[in-house]
Image: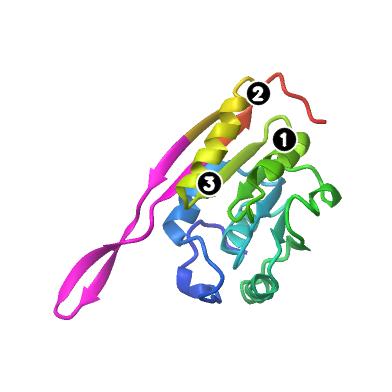
Amino acid sequence: MRHYLGISDEEFIRSKQVPMTKKEVRILTLVKARIPANGVVWDIGAGTGSLSIEAANLCPQGKVWAIERRPEAISLLRLNIANLAVPNIGIIAAEAPDGLEKIPAPDCVLIGGTGGQLEDILEAVHKRLRPRGRIVLNCVTVQTMYNALSWFRAHEEQYDYEAVQVQVSQLRRVGNYDMMQSDNPICIIAASPKHHMEVA
């Protein structure tokens, strides 16, 4: 297992059909997540498993549950888990929120892909999240960002939340020149229960 954040993107087996959270966004997402060493993590919409694998390295005495609905992504998940030798990840082949009731209550929930079920997923997470837990969403589209922020605003008596938008530019060689080329901007929303909340 790695003891640092920021596995190179090139180390992951990838597919054009399955998105992957890039290294710099992964690092910031996991810093926001504050994963305890013995924590339980849910990674909803795990894709290639890049976040699941880095999260698992941060909680060597804990467990990461990677929830993914697409067969191609599940195949990539299995390949990457084996290739990077990360033992403490379990895979739930389901479309969230289905399958969440079968796994232990989380200390941290990472939400990437939602399959259009964001509100149902947040409600399911809300019922299970531990009192000092964290929810971190990576929003690629404006609609997902709006829906997530609207949900937290509607629950502002129960959650403290923050958001940051990140756009990373990478150095690329173009002929005889070096240029900075931008990746898509990502909005990262992080939330914690207020202290009076209790686990259901």
What type is the residue that disc 3 sits on?
A: Thr
Q: Secondary structure at mark 3?
A: helix
What type is the residue that disc 2 sits on?
A: Gln
> Which of these two is toward me, 139 or 147?
147
Q: Which mark is residue 126?
A: 1
* Badge nearest the viewer, 3 or 2: 3
> Which of these two is toward me, 200 or 122?
122
| Magenta residue span | 163-189
What type is the residue that disc 1 sits on?
A: His
Which of marks 2 and 3 precedes in the sequence? 3
Check the picture and name the quadrant holding the N terminus: bottom right
Which residue is labeled 2 in the image?
Answer: 158
CB atoms of marks 1 and 2 within 8 Å? yes
Which residue is labeled 3 in the image?
Answer: 144
Seen from this angle, which residue lies furthest bottom? 175
Give the residue displayed 46% in from the left and 37% down from the top.
Answer: 163
Percent x, y of residue 58: 61, 52
Percent x, y of residue 50: 57, 63
Give the residue displayed 63% in from the left and 59% down from the top.
Answer: 52
Give the residue displayed 63% in from the left and 52% down from the top.
Answer: 116
Check the picture and name the quadrant holding the C terminus: top right
Which of marks 2 and 1 precedes in the sequence? 1
Give the residue displayed 55% in from the left and 33% down from the top.
Answer: 150
Residue 62 lies, with reference to residue 170, above or below; the image says above
